[in-house]
Amino acid sequence: WHWLAAIQNKGFLEFFFVGEQFMRFLGKHETVGSVPLAVFWALILVWFFPWTAFLPAAFARARKNQDESQRILFRLASAWAIVILGFFSVSARLEHYVFPAIPALSLFVGVALHDNDKSKPVSWAFRGLAFWGIFLVVIDGCYLRYDPLEPENM
C-alpha cells in the first residue's frame, strides 16, 4: 500500500514516515488534540468502561497461582498493554491512541471472569456496577421527569 501510494504521490514516503510518524513521536509535529499524560491514562478507564470495574479482579487473579496457559496469557497481555501505553505515553498523546491496548486489557478481564469460583474482587465489581446502575436510574427519575403541564409539551 505504501509503495503504491508513493508511486502515485511524489513525496508521500517522506510526508508519511518522517512527518506523520517520526516527527509526531518527537513532538515536533503540530498535534491538535494532544492530551496531558494523566488524562491519557484516565481515558483508558473511560474507554474500557464497564469492564474497568473488573480490572482489580484481573490483577488480583494475575497474582494468584494459575496454570501455565494462564500465566502465558497474562504475560502476553501485560507486554502488549505496557508496550502500547508506554510508547504513546512518551509521544504526542491523542486520546484514541489507547485503543490498541483495550484488547490486551480484555484478555486480563476475560481470564478473571472465566473462574467459576466467584472471587471477592469479581463480586465487588458486580456490586459496584449494580450500585451505579441503580444510582443513575434514580437520578434519571428525579431530574428528567416528563411534566405534561409544561407549555412546550402541549
Image (spheres, rainbow, N blue to C red):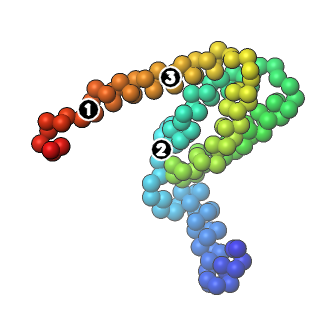
Q: State left or right for residue 92 relative to residue 4.
A: left
Q: Disc 2, disc 1: CB below 8 Å?
A: no
3D distance between C-alphas at marks 2 and 1: 38 Å
- The three-letter code of the residue at mark 3 reads Ala
The residue indicated by pointer 2 is 36
The residue indicated by pointer 3 is 130
Which SS class for mark 3?
helix
3D distance between C-alphas at marks 1 and 3: 22 Å
Q: Which residue lies furthest to the right in this view?
A: 68
Q: How many labels does the image show?
A: 3
Residue 126 location, quadrant: top right
Q: Which of marks 1 and 3 is nearer the N terminus?
A: 3
Which SS class for mark 1?
loop
Q: Where is residue 148 in the image (x, y as percent from the top left)?
A: 18, 36
Judge whether 29 appears above or below 117 on screen.
below
Within 10 angstroms of label 3, few (less than 14), some, or many (20 or more) residues?
few
Taking the image as drawn, is residue 90 in sight? no
Which SS class for mark 2?
loop
Q: Disc 2, disc 3: CB below 8 Å?
A: no
The residue indicated by pointer 1 is 145
Q: Position of residue 136 (x, y in %)?
A: 39, 28
Residue located 48% across and 40% down the image: 39
